[in-house]
Amino acid sequence: MSQEANPFESLQSQIDEAATYLDIGDDVIERLKYPERVLETNLTIERDDGTLERFKAFRSQFNGDRGPYKGGIRYHPQVSRDEVRALSGWMTYKTAIVDIPLGGGKGGIILDPDDYSESELERLTRSFAKELRPMIGEDRDVPAPDVNTGQREMNWIKDTYETLENTTEPGVITGKALDSGGSEGRVEATGRSTVIAAREAFDYLDKDLEGATVAVQGYGNAGWIAAKLIDEMGATVVAASDSSGGIYNPDGFDPVAAKDHKNETGSVVGYEESEEEITNDEVLTLDVDLLIPAALENAVDEDLAADVSADVISEAANGPLTPAADEVLKEKDVFVIPDILANAGGVTVSYFEWVQNRQRFYWSEERVNEELETVIVDAFDALVEAYEENDLDNPRTAAYVVAIQRVADAFAEAGSWP
Ligand code: GLU
């Protein structure tokens, strides 16, 4: 995995690339390339052994022109100011391409959660929630889960916020457990949009998804659900990987059983239906019909891109391809469904959760999935329209053309304020 590409620079080059097809002034584009503000804070908590430890944390509010800032909070040793700034920008254009009335934000704490107990993580999460309190709220900024955070952390943040504010405001955060005001279908949503987008792309390219071979890099929430759903659609999952390595069986395997194996042992590696153990990079370069990168940024750099053999890529992760990799894949005619559309199911169902929280009226899973389907199909159609109209050779640029225009329109309509 390349560590070279700075994700914030990747975001800015993606915006610059799309801007060449837009009739928007450079001064406005400049504004759309930077976050409105970034909180950097140091959280000091007591460890279980009584010693203190300091953690650096960030929250970037990138753009609020189309609604409250929206985006997850990740816990990872690789979190940095630039990573959070990039991810908050990607959220801005993600909410815009799927046309939900929200802006973009992102947060993170630098740590490896595996090194801490549950009560230490609770103290740290509540400490972060206390810092975030003045800047979040259902009409201001609405965090959500991201890498290594989930319902548990969201429930703690909601409880801390509501306790300090002396109110009930479940819409301050999304991705909560059902009993804490979460939505049906939220856990599956990222993987679900990844495969809906893949299905639409196969249809657009006149390719058959039935029997298509699929490799999934990263077997966390997004990756394994995508594997399960694509298998249900008739495709064959032949490879999967996590941070410990990859598994491969040219005849395919049961993605749910592979997940059960990971739950029991901590990794997909060693799963009995695997014919061969392969590396993460080998998973990314297998000759398959569909590749789903579902781990972290920069999984495919320029060098690895030269070896990618998939026909279609659906990005479940945020920023898995570097801009240089994008260039190589464009030359090779690989159809890349960009992260801001492919994985937008997560934030879309977060939006549904927020709507339900505000109305105090909850939907069935069937309704959530139906509405999600409509949002992703409409976004894919908007991408295709821009792709064809501008005679583009990269679907990512098409997505940014649509998304940037929507944000710029909201900004222009708001007028200026001294
Ligand atoms: N972390 C997810 C993402 O990157 C979901 C964000 C949200 O639900 O607000 O899109």
Image: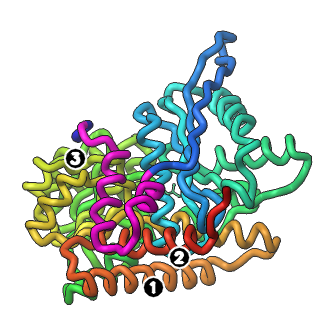
Residue 28 appears in which quarter of the rendering?
bottom left
Q: Nearer the viewer, mark 2 or mark 1?
A: 2
Amino acid tagged 1? Asp
Residue 231 placement, left or right of 110: left
The residue tagged with tag 3: helix, strand or loop? helix
Q: Residues within 10 Å of mark 3 (few under 14, many from 20)?
A: many
Task: Residue at 51%, 85% (x, y): give it.
Answer: 374
By secondary structure, the bulk of the magenta-drawn segment is best described as helix
Q: CA distance from mark 3 to mark 2?
A: 34 Å
Residue 185 placement, left or right of 140: left
Residue assigned mark 1: 378
Residue assigned mark 3: 280
If the image is split into quadrants, where does the C terminus sit?
bottom right
Q: Are marks 2 and 1 in contact (CB under 8 Å)?
A: yes
Residue assigned mark 2: 99
Question: Compared to 76, does 396 lie above or below?
Answer: below
Q: Indicate if the residue with disc 1 has its beta carbon within 8 Å of ligand 1.
A: no
Q: Residues within 10 Å of mark 2 (few under 14, many from 20)?
A: some
The magenta stretch spans which residues?
4-33
Residue 170 percent location from the top left of the image: 77, 58
The residue tagged with tag 1: helix, strand or loop? helix
